Amino acid sequence: MKRFFLTTAIDYVNSRPHLGTAYEKVCADVIARYKRLAGFDTRFLMGDDEHSQNVYKQAIEQSLDPLAYCDQMEQVFRTAWRHLDVSFDDFIRTTEPRHRTGTTYLAQRIYDAGDIYEGVYEGWYCVSCEEFKQEKDLVDGNCPLHPTLKPEWIREKNYFFRLSKYQQPLLDHFRDHPEFMQPDTRRNEILRLIEGGLVDISMSRAGQSWGIPLPWDPSSVVYVWFDALINYASAVGLGAPEDTGRQMFERWWPADLHIVGKDITRFHAVFWPAMLMSAKLPVPRQVFGHGFMTINGQRMSKTLGTIIDPIEAANRLGVDPLRLYLVKEVSFGGDGDFSWERFDERYNVDLANNLGNLVSRVSAMAARYRSGAVRPTGARSDQLVRIAEQVVADYRRAMDAFMLHEGAAAAYRLIDATNEFIAATAPWTLAKDPASADRLTEVLFDAAEAIRLAAVLLAPIMPASSREILRRVGVSAEGLTLDRDGRWRADGERVLAQEGPLWPRKEQTIVTDNQTQAPSTPAPGTTPGTAAPGTPAPQSSDRISIDDFMKVEMRVAKVLAAERVPKSNKLLKLQVDAGTEHRTLVAGIAEAYEPDALVGKTVVIVFNLKPAKLMGIESNGMVLAASPDGGQPRVVTFEDPPPPGSRVR
Ligand code: MSP
């Protein structure tokens, strides 16, 4: 079996996880889950970076022993990642004995190779970056990434790693392995940096106790970055004395993929391979530098108050909606932005109105017309099958290249095509014609099969929702494989479950600038906002209860045809697609609208109104329209129309 070993950056534990660090972990998890689905024996490593001065300071400020502080933070991080359904196989801490073993081993090998020498470092050090800075790196004397914190001037005995010696080997490696650093924009940045010349770097710190002592000079500790990078190899047994450790290292090293943020690609694509080259160990196959998440367009920062807690974000609309947002809304490799309004909006569009509604409609029609059980009857819908096959091919290509957003978009093309398929085949019309019985069964089966396939493709992104959708369309979610389950399958009866909405629609929120706290959730079914100016607020005794309101079933409907009602100036006769059926309605809007202008528009209708005869025509429902005083009626429409049949509340 092919194997795949992937890692994320290990996080500094001086502060809690935030949406930016969570973004990295979720994207890496999507890749890990995709690789498992694609049949790879996958190992997914994450962890905590503990030997930082900031971590030490944080512990001292809290009057805690540093290790006890790190123990607490391990729980905080693990809890956050578990909450987000991140399926890591291993979690390493740099204070663990296995990491000390690996670090000591690698440092000694590099020392023995003659690539470490003693010297004195005199210059700037930014504690927040944990980086030695050259004068040219500073802006107005400050670190550009931490402008409010002055870098420290330090003079201390350091051991240096001969990075300069690896300039040519690194250039050769980049030339021979263009895939080593991705995406290409970041590869080019790093290549320019190497071509510009590499200087030797400090690999130790003197006079500190928090860290791993150098094996040849225990009065110094390994510099935190040198230490942290080694985690990837020590987690799979680097330097382990016993056979099991050695076998593990042989099995998993080199790593296939390191996923890290764009700010730390230099450490991963320059220092780390040079360290491994010096130790005569294989270098990782690929480093992927993702972009940064901003909040309302601003950098995430504690000082600016622009930190979002990923658990809070997940609790607002669900873990999977958050995962889908992070993956589908940001092109992986580039920067992305998060706002509460956009999160709510995408949830409504992609989940409540689109995928959720599709699952509900198909299971409702299966229940209504076929008591829930559907099966292929022989005349499958070739066009939908062709689209599905194309989507799977596009999805695989995108996911293999880590273009996660394109993978999500491919799955959504299948969902859109299934919605269109239902509108075009109109099962509610087929249901009226006994001669179309087999065709109706097949249409419902094909729609359910397309949903099944979309759920399989979405499994790495929305694991729990995918399982639930698969259950509702009557198939097992156990042991999915892309080869077997990622194909159109016409393999017998499926019993669909008709249950409540997967994602109830969320009322849109109004969020003020810079708001990083989730806006409070209004009571179910209520819309935040105020009455129109000049409209007196109803007395509480005049108000109706939510139960009364919910009796009115309003639905999204698409106008298919419109014509004037003969001998009437006011009335139009409309044919609409209301999701589960076509309806005829009569609406008093003829003075404001030409019939043709309404065709194709998406409107809102009251669906459960008793039929009424108007000018001899039976009207089955009512179109919602505003009636401004003295003005003409204006039909309620949408900027971003949801599919017909979506409930409006
Ligand atoms: N400890 C080092 C990594 C050592 S890896 C051998 C570190 N830690 S960190 O906690 O500062 O960052 C962890 C990861 O989160 C890094 O890959 C970093 O780029 C990423 N991110 C931090 N803020 C981020 C955003 N706002 N957006 C996306 N990723 C972000 O660096």
Image (cartoon, rainbow, N blue to C red):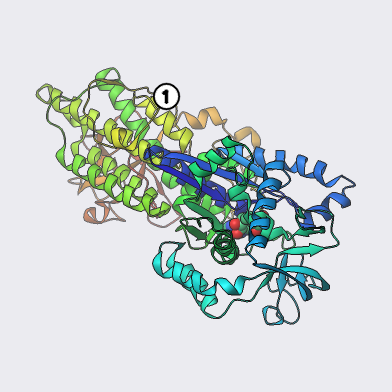
Can residue 317 be seen in this snapshot?
Answer: yes
Q: Nearer the viewer, residue 380 or 249?
A: 249
Residue at left offset 74%, top offset 72%: 147
Residue at left offset 64%, top offset 61%: 110
Q: Is residue 473 above or below residue 517?
A: above
Query: Quadrant where the N terminus lies?
Result: top left
Q: Is residue 135 left or right of residue 446?
A: right
Ligand 1, what quadrant? bottom right
* Res 580 quadrant in image: top left
Can residue 506 be seen in this snapshot?
Answer: no
Q: Is residue 446 above or below residue 278?
A: above
Residue 103: give x, y in percent of width and height.
Answer: 67, 52
**The furthest residue to the left:** 435
Q: Nearer the viewer, residue 325 or 125?
A: 125
Q: Does dot 1 land on a helix, a strand or a loop?
A: loop
Q: Is mark 1 within 8 Å of ligand 1?
A: no
Q: How many marks?
A: 1
Residue 401: give x, y in percent of width and height.
Answer: 38, 55
Residue 176: give x, y in percent of width and height.
Answer: 39, 67
Residue at left offset 71%, top offset 42%: 96
Q: Nearer the viewer, residue 286 or 413?
A: 286
What is the crowding at mark 1: few (fewer than 14 residues within 10 Å), some, or many (at least 20)?
few
Q: Nearer the viewer, residue 405 or 125?
A: 125
Q: Is residue 480 above or below residue 216?
A: above
Residue 119: give x, y in percent of width and height.
Answer: 77, 73
Residue at left offset 20%, top offset 31%: 443
Q: Amino acid at mark 1?
A: Glu
**What residue did someone put label 1 on?**
499
Q: Is residue 48 above or below residue 331?
A: above
**The furthest residue to the right:** 63
